[in-house]
Image: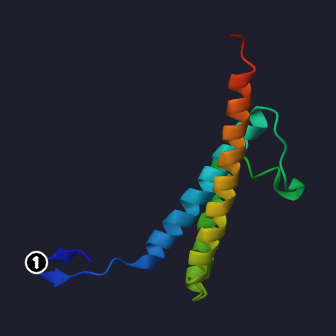
Amino acid sequence: MPEIAGHTVAIPAIPINALAFVCLNMADAWLTTQLLAHGGAEAFWWSAHYNANMFVKGLLAFLVAILLIRLGKARLLKWLNIAMLFVVLSNGICFLGYLSSWLYWQPR
């Protein structure tokens, strides 16, 4: 833990988890936008109208985080962050797969 003037200071986990949740959702929206721009398809048809918009996705994630904090369920943010990390990693793998196939088919 960090120390300030010889006193140990705890870093509050709730704001960090909320910020991580918003950032992971925005990363998911950015990767989704990149995949859709290169001919990909949205896996969840019901969220296709907002899932590729970073601002809307970030705002919705922020509202969910605030709602969970206000309801006293902020501990759920940790599990949501773990789930979103898998979503972002899977989107990143798909995007890297697209880039590698694009580079492979370029004229030599």
> Residue 105 at x, y = what percent?
75, 20
Say which quadrant the N terminus sits in.
bottom left
Q: Is residue 90 above or below residue 95?
A: below
The residue beneath circle 1 is 5
Residue situated in front as seen by the camera: 58 or 3: 3
- Taking the spot 18% from the left edge, 76% from the top edge, the residue there is 3
Seen from this angle, which residue lies furthest left? 5
> Residue 2 at x, y = what percent?
23, 74
User: Please, which colouring scheme is shown?
Assistant: rainbow
The amino acid marked with disc number 1 is Ala
Say which quadrant the C terminus sits in.
top right
Question: Can I make out residue 101 in this image?
Answer: yes
> Residue 72 at x, y = what percent?
57, 89
- Mark 1 lies on a secondary structure that is loop
Residue situated in front as seen by the camera: 43 or 52: 43
- Left of 6 or right of it: where is 13? right
